[in-house]
């Protein structure tokens, strides 16, 4: 049986990604996750960095889904 596209052999190993290329993206993702954790889990209006209860009301169902108490 012949193939139109050559099949990759067992010796084809992808090159490793250097840590210097991954680190900035990992730090960025970590900061974004911490901001989201604050906005969804910690921001209750009383200790809020953002005045008002708009964020709490906007993410109310998500708080219950993630197991954060809010009542």
Image (cartoon, rainbow, N blue to C red):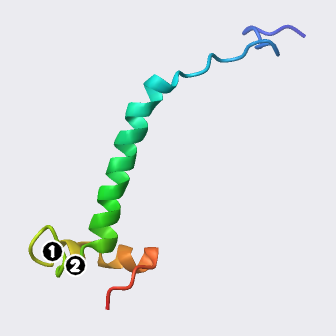
Tell me residue 63's x, y (percent): 37, 76
Q: To which quarter of the image does residue 20 belong?
A: top left
In the image, residue 22 above or below residue 46:
above
Residue visible at 37% across and 54% down in the picture: 33
Element class at badge 1: helix
Quadrant location of the N terminus? top right
In the rendered structure, find residue 45 and report the number of the disc placed on it.
none
Q: To which quarter of the image does residue 44 belong?
A: bottom left
Question: Badge 2, how many Cα within 10 Å: few under 14, some, many 20+?
Answer: few
In the image, residue 30 above or below residue 66:
above
Residue visible at 80% across and 10% down in the picture: 3
Tell me residue 5's x, y (percent): 72, 9
Element class at badge 2: helix
Residue visible at 37% across and 73% down in the picture: 62
Q: Nearer the viewer, residue 31 or 52?
A: 31
Quadrant location of the C terminus? bottom left
Please give the residue where the numbered disc 2 appears in the rendered image: 57
In the rendered structure, find residue 54 and report the number of the disc placed on it.
1
Task: Describe residue 21's horizontal placement relative to residue 5 as left or right.
Answer: left
In the image, residue 53 above or below residue 8:
below
In the image, residue 34 above or below residue 22:
below
Question: Badge 1, how many Cα within 10 Å: few under 14, some, many 20+?
Answer: few
Tell me residue 14's x, y (percent): 65, 18
Extreme-left residue of the structure: 51
Give the total number of marks visible in the rendering. 2
Residue visible at 17% across and 79% down in the picture: 45
Extreme-right residue of the structure: 1
Tell me residue 68's x, y (percent): 40, 79
The answer to the question of whether label 1 and label 2 lie on touching residues, with beta carbons closer than 8 A, is: yes
Distance (Cα) linking label 1 and label 2: 5 Å
């Amino acid at each position: 049986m012949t193939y139109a596209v050559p099949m990759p052999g067992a010796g084809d190993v992808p090159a490793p990604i250097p840590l210097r290329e991954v680190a900035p993206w990992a730090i960025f993702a970590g900061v974004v996750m911490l901001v989201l954790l604050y906005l969804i889990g910690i921001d209750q209006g009383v200790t809020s960095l953002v005045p008002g209860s708009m964020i709490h009301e906007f993410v109310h169902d998500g708080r219950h889904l993630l197991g954060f108490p809010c009542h």
